[in-house]
Image (cartoon, rainbow, N blue to C red):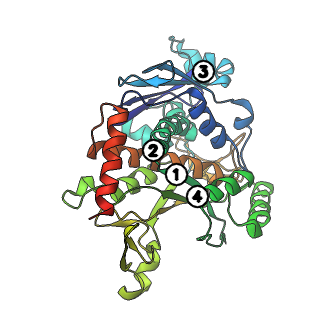
Amino acid sequence: MRYLTAGESHGKQLTTIIEGIPSNLSLTKDDINASLLRRQKGHGRGKRMQIEKDLVEIASGVRHGYTLGSPISMVIHNDDFKHWIDVMGEDPISEDQQIRRTVTRPRPGHADLNGAMKYGHRDIRNVLERSSARETAARVAAGAVAKTLLSQLGIEVIGYVKEIAGIVADDQQEITIKERQTISEESPVRTLDKNVEQKMMDAIDLAKKEGDSIGGVAEVYVEGMPAGIGSYVHYDRKLDGRIAGAVASINAFKGVEFGIGFEAARRNGSRVHDEIAWEKERGYYRKTNRLGGFEGGMTTGMPIVVKGVMKPIPTLYKPLQSVDIESKEPFQASIERSDSCAVPAASVVMEHVVAFELAKGILEQFPNDQFPKLKKALDEYREELRCF
C-alpha cells in the first residue's frame, strides 16, 4: 500500500491517491471529513483555518460505500484559490507580471532557500507553495482511509498533545483509548490533562501577543495491534523504523521516540526492558510497556506509544534576518498571518501518518485483495498467538 499527494497551498486543490486498499471495505466521505475537520481545530490556529472548509471529494475507487480494490483518488478543494488565480494559475504570464510577483526573500526555518537551490528556482513561491503544511491535509485524508480499515479490524488509533512550550501533561496510563478520544476532542489544545490545559492556552496566547511561536510534543496511542507485525529480518521492514520516518516527515517535526524513548539512555537495563508474562485467556503480554509496544522492529501486542517533537513554526510576526537571493542584501523576514502554535493540529496529522504505516504493515503480512479475507486471516492469527 502506498499513497501520493499533489497540490500547492494556494493552488486549485490537494489530491491524494492511495493504491493497495482491499476491495469491499466500507468507506464513505464522512469517514474522511471527520478527520479533516479535526486537523483544522486547536487553540493557536491562524486565519487560514477560517478560510478553508476542508471537505473531501472521492473521485475514484469507491462505489456505493465500498472500496473497489482499485486506486482511491480524493480531492480537497482550496477555497482560497479564487483569490490567487492570477498568482497560481497554470497559464503563461508576461515577463512584467512575473517580475512583479517574484518572491526572492527566503524565510528562516522554511524550505525556501534549500528548495530554491535544489530545483533552480529564482522565484521562491515555486518552493513555498508545495512545502507548506497545507499538504498535510492530503496526508490526513490518506490516513483517514487507513484508520477506517484499522478500526474495522479492531485496531484504534488516537493522537493528542503531551507537551506545549515545556508544559507537560501527566501520563494518563489508566484511562481507556475511548476515554482518550473523548477527552482530547473536548480540549482546545487536545491534551488529556485538564490541570495543564489552561496553562498551555495561556502560553500560546502569550507567544501570539509577542509575535512569536511555540512547539511541543504530540503522542499517538494505539490499541489492538497483534504481536509480530513488522520484521526483525530486514532493516527497511522494521515497523517502528517506518513509523519514525513517517513522523519525522511531517512539517516541523524534529524527533521521534517510542515508550520511554530517550529516557532509556539514563536508566539501567533492568528499568527499561519489559518482563514477559502469560495468562490462559490473554496469552503472552508484558508487565510494563516501557518500549512502547515494539521489540526488534516488531509489535509486541502491547499498546503502541509513540511521541513526536514539533519545533515552533518558523513563520513569525517577530522578524528574523535573512538575505535576498537577487540583491544579496539582508532583510527582516515578516509575514501576514501564521499559527502561533500548531501542535494540537499536528497531533492529528501524526495520528494519521502512524495509522497509515500500521495499516501498511498489516496489509503486507496478510491476504490483502479482499477485506473480508483480510479480516478472517487476522482473526485466525490472533487466535494462533493466544494459543502459542
Q: Which residue position holds label 2?
A: 150
Disc 2 + disc 4, Cβ < 8 Å = no
Q: Tell me the distance, in whole angstroms, between the alpha carbons under discs 1 and 2.
A: 8 Å
Q: Which residue position holds label 4?
A: 177
Image position, residue 49 (x, y; %):
70, 37
Q: Is residue 291 above or below residue 339?
A: below
Instruction: Give the SS element for disc 4.
Output: helix
Disc 4 + disc 3, Cβ < 8 Å = no
Image position, residue 278 (x, y; %):
36, 74
The structure residue drawn at horizontal position 49% and vertical position 57%, both measured from the top left corner, is: 222
Q: Tell me the distance, in whole angstroms, between the alpha carbons under discs 2 and 4.
A: 14 Å
Q: Tell me the distance, in whole angstroms, between the alpha carbons under discs 3 and 2.
A: 41 Å
Q: Amino acid at mark 4?
A: Ile
Q: Amino acid at mark 1?
A: Val
Task: Say whether residue 266 is visible.
Answer: yes
The structure residue drawn at horizontal position 37% and vertical position 34%, both measured from the top left corner, is: 371
Q: Is residue 319 left or right of residue 108?
A: right
Q: Is residue 175 left or right of residue 127?
A: right
Image position, residue 79 (x, y; %):
67, 23
Circle on res. 87 = 3
